[in-house]
Structure formats: C-alpha cells, structure tokens
Amino acid sequence: MSKNKYLFPFILICSLFFMWAFLHNINSILIPHLKKVCQLSDTQSSLIDFAVYLGYFVIAIPAGLFCHRFGYKKAILCGLFLYAVGALIFLPAADNRSFGLFLLALFIAASGATFLETVANPYATILGKPDTSEQRLNFAQSFNGLGAFVAPLIGTHFILSGIEHSKAELDAMAARGELTAYLQTEANSLKMPYVVIAAVLTLIAIIFIFTKLPEPKDEHTTKFSLGIFRISHVRWAVIAEFFYVGSQVGVLSFFIRFSRYTANIPEKEAGDILAYGAMLGFMAGRFLGTFFMRYIKPARLLSLYATINIVLVIIAITTHGRTSVYAITATPFFMSIMFPTIFALGIKDLGEETKLASSFLVMSIIGGAFTPLMMGLISDNTGGNIQIAYIMPMICFAFILYFGLKGHKVKGITKPQAALA
C-alpha cells in the first residue's frame, strides 16, 4: 500500500491541530482583554477558560459517538461549522459588551474544536505504522504548537491596545462620561480577528468537502461504556491529561497578569514575551520532541520534562522580577510533548476501542476549566497575589510525572489497531 495515499489527508489533519490550538491559546489574550472590557475579577475572567473546557467536557462523548456512526469526515465538517458559528457570535458580543454572550461564543466554538480534536488525534496515529504512532502524533501536534505561537502574537498586536488604566483613572473617566466609549473601543478590536477566523474555517471546510479521506474499517461496534476504565493505562492517561491541560491553561492564561504582578511588565510587552518566548518555545519543543523520541522512549522523556517543569514553577513562585517571568516562560517548551505523548500512550493497543478512549481523553480536557478557576480564587482571596496561585500547575506536573513513570504501562492489552481502507 502506498504511503503517499495518506500524505494529503495527513496534511489536512495537521491544519485542524493549528485551528484548535488557536482557540485555546488566544485565551491568554482574551482573559486580560475581557477583564478590562467587562470589568472582571480574576475569578470571573477565569470563566473564559471554563466556558471553553466545559464545551470539551459536554461534547466529547457525543463527538466520539457521532464520529463512530458517521465517520471521520462528517465529524470534521460538523466541528468546523460549530467553530465558525462561535467565532461569528463574537460580533454581537462585542457590540453589546456582553460577557455572557462572549462565554456562549466560546462554548460553541469549543464544541466545534472538540469534534476536531476527537477525530484528529486518533486519526493521526492510524495514518501509518502503529509502532511510530507517538512520533506521528507529536509531528501533527507540532502544528498545534504553531497555532499556540500565532494566537498570542495576533492577539497582542490586533486585540490588545496597550492602554492600561488604574482604577482611579477609570473612575475619573466614568465621572466625565467617557468610560463607556473607551470600553466599547476596546471591545470592537475583537471583531475583525474573529471574522477572519470564521472565513479561514469555512475555507478549510470546503477543502475537506472535496477531499476523499480514508476511513478505518471497524469490525466491531464499540458502544459507550465506562468499562474502558478497566484498562489501567487508559484510566491513568485520562487523569494525566486532566492535570496536563489544567497545568498548560493555568500557566498561560494568567501569564500577562503574572508578568505585571511579579515584574511590572506592561501588557503589550508581556504579550510579546508570551508569543516569542513561551509559545515559540512550545512550538520548537514539539518539533524537537519528535526528534528526541528517536533516541529516548516517550514515557521517559515525559517524566524528564515533568520534573523540569516542577523545578521551574518552584523558581517562579519563590523569586521576583524577570527571573520569575522567565522561569514561567520556559515551561511551555517542556509542556510541548505532554498532551500528544499522554494521548498516544493512553490509546496504545486498544484496537476498536480507540475511538471511545479518545473521547474520554478529550473529555478530560475539562481540567483546563478547573485549574484557572482555582488560581483565580486563590488570587482573589490573597489580595490579587497571582504568583502564589501558580502552585496549582506545580501540583498538576506531579501527576504527569507519575503517569510517565508508572501509569502509562500497558497491562494485558494486545488488540490490533483498526486497518485503513
């Protein structure tokens, strides 16, 4: 069978990794921006992440069942449609400066991204030889890293204004009747980026419509069942993915707040550090991780990276100034391989149960809703001390370390993967 048969489908699948990464990582810009536009507390602003990852939690299982019934291609098209609709809802949300409408838009967009992620992760692993599935998924996830880099870069330069007023200045503007106009100007900066996002998603959908995708042959019907958790490495992978996504979202979502708090860095400069430092490192880490796995077993590399990140977060919590900011900036490089590696190890040797396990792994992304929420609560209850709130990602990395050391081990599962048509 020709390897070229899978080349163009694999390229298209890689584009999906970029798109949902954009959705996730633009939140690091939306959180400080909507905090300003809608006058939110840290806890309230964490609901931006909560809306996105709640969408994953609610839609993951339906997306997996939809994919099983109707196939990969229709699931992808459904995901692209929902994502585009969510992006377009940003227009009325900005016009009305409605935080509730922004949250609805993010929930719908995330629902679409859930379809894409539920399909693309397992699809990338089966488009080739089973013994190189981790490397193939890490390569595809490198485009996720590209999206993670581009999102804060675009957000910093096309959404953030760089204007940061103190509470006293905002009160003075309100007294002069200028506050509403200022806040509306800030809200309007969201419109054009999300129109462009909707247009790009529509174009990708059109390409998929006219592309023939190979479909796996499932010889058995896999029904929804919690029985999948009888498999040890699936169970631990779901737990590890929950904590990984929580750590990633927690670290990045409050990065701009953290930079201002610990080193008094303005939002535009912090946004550039996030893009050119943290997320460029994340992207580079994906590509380098794929290379390193030729020589280091994926689970071992995962354990090493988790240990390094625990040390980096301890430095970030216990120091001040740019040292703490740079410690946090370094963590995404070592987070880069975590999601795809945990995912690939979690669905290893599952055969026809791969789709169901994939749904639960995507569902575990709900961890991205709870870690930022806990960080917001810690910050608001310690007088706005966002630095101490970073203890939450450190705890998350400890769970990932356990998975890399012991939890990933496959016990008694020898079923072959589904063959491609």
Image: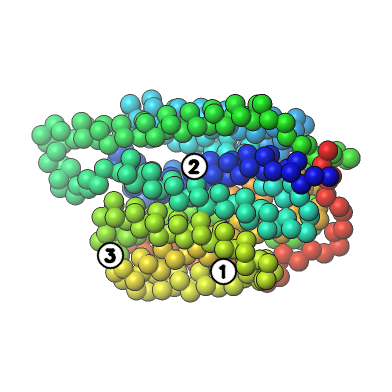
Q: CA distance from mark 3 to mark 2?
A: 28 Å
Q: Which element type, helix, strand or loop, lies under badge 2?
A: helix
Q: Which element type, helix, strand or loop, lies under badge 3?
A: helix
Tag 2 residue: 23
The amino acid sitting under disc 3 is Ala
* Residue 261 image position (x, y, % from top left): 29, 61
Residue 347 visible in image:
yes
Q: CA distance from mark 2 to mark 1?
A: 25 Å
Which image quadrant is residue 175 in?
Answer: top left
Q: CA distance from mark 3 to mark 1?
A: 25 Å
The amino acid sitting under disc 1 is Ala
Q: Nearer the viewer, residue 185 or 376?
A: 185
Number of residues whose C-alpha sits closer than 10 Å to that of mark 2, classed few (under 14), some (14–19) or many (20 or more): many
At x 30% / y 38%, what residue is drawn? Answer: 37
Tag 1 residue: 306
Number of residues whose C-alpha sits closer than 10 Å to that of mark 1, classed few (under 14), some (14–19) or many (20 or more): many
Tag 3 residue: 263
The amino acid sitting under disc 2 is Leu
* Residue 272 image position (x, y, % from top left): 34, 54
Q: Which residue is the extreme one toward the right?
A: 219
Q: Which element type, helix, strand or loop, lies under badge 1?
A: helix
At x 58% / y 45%, what residue is drawn? Answer: 17
Number of residues whose C-alpha sits closer than 10 Å to that of mark 3, classed few (under 14), some (14–19) or many (20 or more): some
Dot 3 or dot 1: first in sequence order is: 3
Dot 2 or dot 1: first in sequence order is: 2
